[in-house]
């Protein structure tokens, strides 16, 4: 048999596959109607497992892995089609619709009570003033304090660093996301301009210790590595560290902080080129207890716990690719108390003002052990 004959056979088989696929999707539609009447969820993991075991056994050892991949894709398409029929209105869909109609204004308000970590002069304060022209700021000792202030209604908004272009993600904030209930309503990228400073009048006495936030120390790692004789001490915030140095009686103590702290706390700049990278940016998120959706919002963030099984993450990423959604970031963090299991954080370009995006989110929700919509927001 030559190549042309083989391809003719393949064409005939493809025609039969399409005919049967259409029949299967028609059955999926009927299943969706029955599930709607019985108020059952679209995803039935146990039923899919039974089918996979049956079809892979029928395919034989050689083709079982390929059959499993094929049927996982068929399941995904069936669930997507059932969700797209429009007969389901999930709690997430209702929540987004209510927020779209209930959020006041077209952007974050000019005036608000905002929680920040640290003290005056902190980078979080600078990010806050970029997002809110006239904020009232309450300072807290920790990131957990900022989350709690928003969650309990003490402050309407909170500002938190989420990642840095040099040092990477702020893992402490990611870990706290699992603990607290909140939504992301805005984001701000801020250029980080570290300076090495001593208190005014300290003179030329050699520096023996530098204090700063852990992220700032990591972002100046090359300078610290070049001076192994200097002790690096972690403090909760760069501005807190600057205030500590200003109030200290030590002439050998220095701080890594922003130029703004020099004026605030009367510090002298010793070195203004200590950052590892001249293009050092930190991304700050603005959180709220309630979901706020503004017209300019074009970035969606999700937090997902997936089944601990092969292909679980691939199913999510594949669904985003099929929908033509641009995935901006994928971050994983260990699940406390569950060995070798992880939660995943997704950032993507999308707008929930688009009904197809809302349907996609509802479909993704069906794939996950736990699905958290963190928000759709604008990033400046």
Image (cartoon, rainbow, N blue to C red):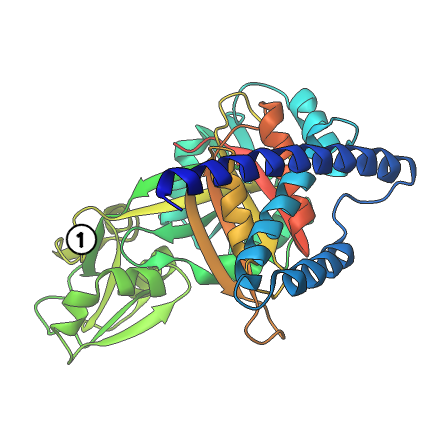
Closer to the camera in the image, 273 or 136: 273
Tell me which corner region of the image, top left, top right, bottom left or bottom right, holds residue 76. top right
Residue farthest front in this picture = 1
Numbered circles on residues, count? 1
Furthest-bottom residue in this view: 229
Query: Tag 1's secondary structure?
Result: loop
Report the side of 98 relative to 177 (left or right).
right
* Mark 1 burial class by Cα count in 10 Å: few <14, some 14-19, many 20+: some
Q: Position of residue 41 (x, y in %)?
A: 80, 45
The residue positioned 67% from the left and 32% from the top of the image is 22
- In the foreground, 214 or 195: 214
Mark 1, residue position: 277
In the picture, measured across the screen, residue 300 lies left or right of residue 77, that is left
Name the residue furthest left.
Answer: 204
Tell me if residue 185 can be seen: yes
Quarter containing the C terminus:
top left
Viewer-nearest residue: 83 or 344? 83
Q: Would you say 356 lies left or right of 299 here? A: right
Which residue occupies 36% across, 48% down?
123
Q: Position of residue 38 (x, y in %)?
A: 92, 40
Image position, residue 87 (x, y; %): 79, 28
Question: Is residue 181 visible from the viewing direction of this image?
Answer: no
In the image, 124 versus 294, the foreground residue is 294
Image: 244 above or below 86: below
Q: Position of residue 332 (x, y in %)?
A: 48, 60
């Amino acid at each position: 048999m030559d190549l042309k004959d083989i391809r003719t056979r393949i064409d005939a088989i493809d025609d039969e596959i399409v005919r049967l696929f259409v029949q299967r999707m028609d059955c999926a539609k009927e299943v969706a109607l029955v599930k709607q009447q019985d108020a059952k969820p679209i995803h039935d993991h146990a039923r899919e497992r039974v089918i996979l075991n049956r079809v892979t056994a029928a395919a034989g050892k050689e083709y079982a892995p390929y059959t499993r991949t094929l049927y996982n894709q068929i399941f995904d398409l069936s669930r997507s089609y059932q969700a797209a029929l429009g007969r389901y209105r999930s709690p997430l869909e209702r929540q987004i619709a209510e927020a779209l109609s209930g959020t006041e204004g077209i952007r974050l308000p000019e005036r608000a009570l905002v929680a920040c970590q640290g003290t005056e002069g902190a980078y979080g304060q600078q990010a806050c003033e970029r997002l809110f022209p006239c904020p009232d700021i309450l300072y807290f000792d920790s990131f957990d304090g900022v989350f709690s202030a928003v969650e309990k209604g003490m402050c309407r908004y909170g500002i938190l660093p989420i990642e840095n272009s040099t040092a990477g993600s702020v893992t402490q904030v990611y870990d706290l996301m699992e603990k607290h209930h909140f939504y992301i309503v805005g984001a701000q990228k801020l250029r980080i301009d570290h300076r090495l400073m001593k208190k005014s009048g300290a003179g030329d006495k050699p520096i023996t210790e530098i204090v700063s936030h852990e992220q700032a120390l990591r972002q100046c790692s090359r300078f610290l590595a070049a001076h192994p004789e200097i002790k690096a001490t972690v403090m909760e915030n760069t501005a807190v560290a600057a205030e500590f140095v200003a109030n200290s009686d030590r002439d050998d103590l220095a701080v890594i902080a922003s130029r703004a702290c020099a004026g605030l706390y009367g510090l002298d700049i010793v070195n203004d080129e200590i950052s590892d990278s001249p293009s050092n940016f930190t991304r700050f998120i603005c959180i709220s207890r309630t979901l706020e959706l503004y017209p300019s919002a074009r970035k969606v963030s999700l937090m997902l716990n997936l089944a601990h099984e092969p292909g679980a993450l691939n199913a999510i990423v594949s669904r985003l690719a099929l929908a033509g959604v641009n995935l901006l970031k994928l971050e994983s963090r260990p699940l406390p108390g569950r060995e070798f299991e992880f939660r995943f954080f997704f950032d993507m370009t999308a707008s929930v003002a688009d009904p197809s995006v809302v349907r996609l989110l509802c479909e993704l929700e069906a794939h996950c052990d736990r699905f958290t919509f963190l928000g759709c927001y604008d990033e400046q």
